[in-house]
Image (cartoon, rainbow, N blue to C red):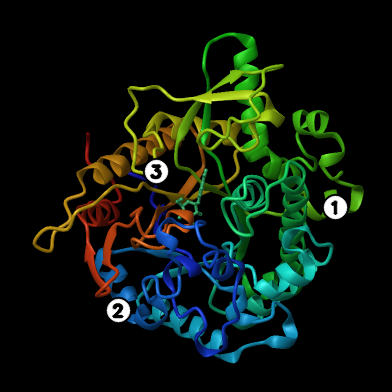
């Protein structure tokens, strides 16, 4: 199974999950630094203070990537490392220097940097002073920060992702309260989501007006979505699955590709969903050069109209009561250690659904991967389940491409075992094992499998 000639093979990480050096060289605190201090929020009360210490070990990490043949590296810039208090008056030269060195090192090794501007580590000052993503100034502050990054790194960075997973920020951070800043509400997620879209739109506008024609780069947003399969053939379950996808992905993709929120959200949320006025519509419509997708799992969706499912935050449902959708899984599906089901056909269906709904945009899978309880024995990690996961999901991707989906690249999540947010270090997503006591890196069997796939640009039959 050969992939298209220019298919991009990458691996992804994010700043807070791997860098460590949380207050080193002038970096300001982020909301995740603070959130981790609250007892009980993170498994074993762990934090990203040291993580993979990538801040100090990045040169050896880039070498390792090179050895594996990784062509593109998606990482994120820590906003409070650039602006310790969140604002442009606080520019921290040491932060600029760090990312300059990382980018230069990548380019010296022929690895293309793909930079995410926001992967959840909001400067703590902006949470206090501006109410985080609820504040009316936050989108402009983000655009200032983005502009600073375009200015300093845009001569070498040609692939920009504004925001990672608006859904997770909104729902897990402002709805369920399980991620920073830990707010619990049934209206704040929709305001946060709106401001995140504005932030994306304003950053893209800056890039297009001031940088894109000189720098010749691409800019887009990455959203996450699981697949929702109708539980039965009944029309109401099919509608429930469609509604679940509206509330998951179209919430953020429709404004960008169609200029407005989905009808199902507007009618169900009323005043809780801020309206998209003409100016916002113009800002957002067409504001992504590619469709960035993070995908992990699949669930069945069934209609739950009129049922009390307010306590159902099962799995990745978001605010189920707003959708009137009941989610479930098939007991025969195998589960990762996150309890996320392994369903490769869900990945293919989702890619085809995106392609159809958004008029065949260029798509990049900017994250796909799995956590397992890996064991290291005699310096070897034989993560058979992860090899199977990548093999089967990549097969799903290949089938999607064969059916006409314009999938142009794939980034494995993650390059390293790292700080898995509320799960701490217990959940290992890496293709490279990290011993967090010694910082020794060991490529797992899945890294070798991925490396072979990249080198041959094709997938071994399964
Ligand atoms: C993504 N959910 O997070 C993030 O982009 C990564 O930083 C993270 O490590 C990775 O996926 C694995 O979790 C998600 O509940 C977190 O649906 C939660 C969900 C989805 C994605």
Mark 1 Cβ and ligand 1 under 8 Å apart: no
Image location (x, y in percent) of residue 79: 62, 74
176 left or right of 54 in image: right
Left or right: residue 355 compared with residue 432: right
Please report whichever mark, 3 or 2, sits nearer to the chain's N-terminal start.
Answer: 2
Compared with 114, 82 (above or below) is: below
Give the residue at the far right of this rendering: 278
Residue farthest to the left?
A: 378
Task: Name which of mark 2 and mark 1 comes first in the sequence.
Answer: 2
CB at disc 3 and ligand 1 closer than 8 Å: yes
Q: Around disc 2, counting alpha carbons within 10 Å, would you say few (fewer than 14), some (14 to 19), or many (20 or more)? A: few
In which image quadrant can residue 376 be found?
Answer: bottom left
Residue plotted at (63% across, 40% down) = 249
Q: Position of residue 268 (x, y in %)?
A: 79, 29
Tag 1, which secondary structure?
Answer: helix
Image quadrant containing the N terminus: top left
Disc 3 versus disc 2: nearer the observer: 3
Q: Name the residue under label 3.
A: 338
**328 above or below 62?**
above
Give the number of the disc on residue 280: 1
Which residue is found at the position 49% from the left and 69% from the top?
15
- Label 3–label 1 contact, CB within 8 A: no
- Which of the marked residues, 3 or 1, is nearer the chain's N terminus? 1
């Amino acid at each position: 199974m050969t992939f298209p000639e220019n298919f991009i093979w990458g691996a992804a990480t994010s700043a807070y999950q791997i860098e460590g050096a949380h207050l080193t060289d002038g970096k300001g605190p982020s909301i995740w630094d603070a959130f981790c201090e609250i007892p009980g929020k993170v498994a074993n009360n762990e934090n990203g203070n040291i993580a993979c210490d990538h801040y100090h070990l990045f040169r050896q990490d880039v070498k390792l990537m090179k050895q594996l043949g990784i062509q593109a590296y998606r990482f994120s810039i820590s906003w409070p490392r650039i602006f310790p208090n969140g604002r442009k008056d606080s520019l921290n030269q040491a932060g600029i220097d760090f990312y300059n060195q990382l980018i230069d090192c990548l380019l010296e090794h022929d690895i293309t940097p793909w930079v995410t501007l926001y992967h959840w580590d909001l400067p703590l000052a902006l949470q206090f002073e501006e109410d985080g993503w609820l504040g009316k100034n936050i989108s402009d502050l983000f655009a200032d920060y983005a502009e600073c990054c375009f200015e300093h790194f845009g001569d070498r960075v040609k692939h920009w992702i504004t925001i990672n997973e608006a859904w997770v920020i909104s729902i897990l951070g402002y709805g369920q309260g399980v991620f920073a800043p830990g707010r619990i509400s049934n209206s704040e997620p929709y305001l946060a989501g709106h401001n995140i879209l504005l932030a994306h739109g304003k950053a893209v506008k800056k890039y297009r007006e001031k940088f894109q024609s000189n720098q010749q780069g691409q800019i887009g947003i990455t959203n996450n979505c699981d697949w929702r399969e109708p539980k039965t053939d009944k029309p109401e379950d099919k509608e429930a699955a469609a509604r679940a996808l509206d509330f998951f992905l179209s919430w953020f993709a429709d404004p960008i590709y169609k200029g407005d929120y989905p009808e199902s959200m507007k009618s169900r949320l009323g005043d809780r969903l801020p309206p998209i006025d003409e100016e916002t519509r113009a800002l957002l419509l067409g504001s992504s050069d590619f469709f960035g997708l993070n995908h992990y799992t699949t669930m069945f969706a069934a209609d739950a109209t009129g049922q009390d499912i307010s306590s159902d935050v099962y799995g990745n449902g978001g605010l189920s009561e707003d959708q009137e959708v009941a989610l479930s899984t098939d007991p025969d599906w195998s589960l990762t250690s996150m309890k996320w089901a392994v369903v490769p056909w869900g990945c293919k269906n989702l890619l085809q659904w995106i392609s159809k709904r958004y008029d065949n945009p260029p798509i990049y899978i900017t994250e796909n991967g799995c956590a397992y309880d890996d064991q290291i024995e005699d310096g070897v990690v034989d993560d058979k389940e992860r090899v199977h996961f990548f093999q089967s999901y990549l097969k799903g991707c290949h089938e999607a491409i064969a059916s006409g989906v314009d999938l142009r690249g794939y980034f494995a999540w993650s390059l390293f075992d790292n700080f898995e947010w509320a799960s701490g270090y217990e959940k290992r997503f890496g293709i490279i094992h990290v011993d967090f006591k010694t910082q020794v890196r060991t490529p797992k069997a899945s890294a070798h499998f991925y490396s072979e796939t990249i080198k041959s640009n094709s997938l071994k039959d399964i």
